[in-house]
Amino acid sequence: MIIDELEKRLRPVEKKLPPYPPKVITLASGEKMVVRQATRDDGPVLLETVRPLIDVERDFYDVVAARVYSELLGWYRYRVADEYCLVGTIDGVIASLVNGRTVNETTGMSYHTITIKRGLRCGAQMFAAKMEYHFEYLKQKEVLIVAESPIGYKRWMIEYQLEARPQVQHELGGVPTHVLTEPLYQAAKPRLVTGQRPVSPQLLATADEFIAPSEYPQIPGFKR
Amino acid sequence: MRNVGIVGIGHIKFGKLEFELVDIMAWTALEAMKDAGIENGIDQVFVSNMGGGIINRQCGIASALVSNLNLEPAMAELVENGPASGSSAVKLGYMAIASGLANVVLVTGGETMRSLNGWQATDFVATLLHPEAEYNYGLTLPAFAGMFTRLYMEKYGLTEQHLAMISVKNHDNAALNPFAHVRLPVTLEAIYGNPDANVINPYMAEPLRIYDMCPVSDGAASLILCNMDIANRFRKKPIRIAGIGQATDTHCVHNRKDPLELTAVKGASEKAYKMAGIGPKEISFAELHDAFSILEVAESEEIGLFERGKAKNAIELGETRVTGRIPINSSGGLKAKGHPVGATGVSQIHELVKQLRREAEPGRQVKEPNYGLAINFGGHAEEN
């Protein structure tokens, strides 16, 4: 009872975030990537998916995966407030995921984008979905963003022409902060944001239960 | 002149490589030497590279490669001729043997470009444009290719769908090529006409989209050339270089009578045909310099494989697929195999040799290959 009471005090106060309606994106390979919002119940499979990448030095997967793991674990175990996670799946298998949180009504905090399936710009589509969530559904005015890898810098800072705001402290700590404002988002949207709604029930059903990848292009020889 | 053959080939997988430029070159050179069955005895080394001085801050690369391979005291020179450096190095290797100066020549091409972002890579390649009349005004190779495509479309009725079909074909071929940078098949439905296509396959230099453009790649490839009179000393049967040609066009594109005519491509191929004593009809397959998909179309017409304006019909009929009448870019082309600029021309010849030896992977081996033709293209067809 005392433990329950303590746990209650440790947990952040959370508000109910508006849902992100699922969408489907046809990738260049012809594969359909379903993007849907994860729930806390999905936590274990998300953690299982990210964990092997913590040992991959190439392209800063180790830094990003370690941080994503910690962020998702914190969310799963009620230690981060107002966090969300969007997941892209192909035939149910997790291809990429993004996460972030809301700071307040007007400001969002982008955490990370991590992609298992490379070469089809899955990560770029997922980052776009994250920004779509902040501006179209959370109705925020700006999102604070940092990049921890050269790929991220090229994808976000350059492609979205983000506004540099180094004087603002991002929760990831120290890395120069950039901001996607609503006007910048609207300008980038036709070029960078896509996806079709509604998703057919059959296709959506494939993403009902996420499947952790059995192979990782980043880890030759890995088999789950 | 003495006849020249190719008796050894080596190639590294194109893509993002975490090794030094000379090391990847040396790796392919050793592969080529192993393929030829030799450990030394190389008289001359030609190295093709475009950006060593700019990207790697390294010069004297040919001597560095010789030293890396313990090939001293072989003669060694670096060949820089823009993205056509590779074929220029092959030509010089041919000349060295044909003239009697050398009996065995190693030709190695290499480039490491992935340390640059896309914009920096585009700027690097644009340094071959006219510095005052073109580069200073912000012109780039994708910009030229975009304008060329628009003009070509208006004159000959080519559509974006035709270009997308080329991309699909070349990605299919690259998916079967272990040396290709991008080994992901793409579908026509996904990159053309789909509601998501404008984002999945966005315009880069309208009307060219991202899937009309080659990736930025690291990579290297090597060849062992020899005097045909001593070819029986090597492990593999030689593939004879029947004809070789080179031509140039005006540095400034605006000085050309018709910007749609790639006269250097035409001139180079005519010289090669004449030397070989054959014509386009004898060509079994071709590796064309498709840094942009439109170039596959235009070059295939300039070298006489199709009448001007008719390549699109061949695309529609699937004639340029590996299973078609005249396969083009069975390697995946620059589009999907990748384009480490200094390595590209050498890599194209590597593919010709592989096909002519009937050593290509299942699914991309050309049927009855007798004559292969490669076009290596520099700038907006200034050098070929």
Image: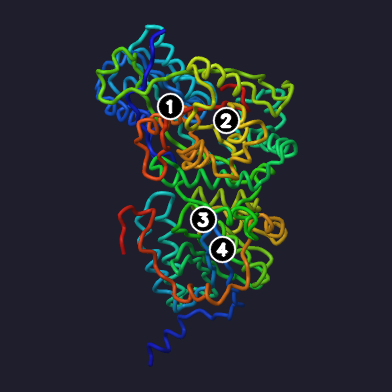
> What residue does disc 3 label?
A29
Tell me the CA gap for discs 3 and 4: 28 Å
Please identify, in this view, whether the residue under mark 1 or under mark 4 is nearer the observer: 1
* Badge 3 element: loop
Q: Are marks 3 and 1 in contact (CB under 8 Å)?
A: no
Q: Nearer the viewer, residue B241 or B186?
A: B241
Q: Measured from the top left, where is residue A138 in percent x and y?
A: 64, 72
The residue drawn where x is 44% and y is 20% is: B90
Q: Measured from the top left, where is residue B248 in percent x and y?
A: 61, 18
Q: Above or below — where is A89 with respect to A12?
A: above
> What residue does disc 2 label?
B305
Tell me the CA gap for discs 2 and 3: 30 Å
The circle on residue B109 is: 1
Horizontal side of residue B335 vs B180, given as left or right? right
- Which amino acid type is marked by label 1? Gly
Q: Name which quarter of the figure residue A184 lies in.
A: bottom right
Please identify, in this view, whether the residue under mark 1 or under mark 2 is nearer the observer: 2
- At label 4, counting other C-alpha atoms closer than 10 Å, the crowd grade (few under 14, some 14-19, many 20 or more) is many
Report the chain holding disc 1. B
The residue drawn where x is 65% and y is 50% is: A161
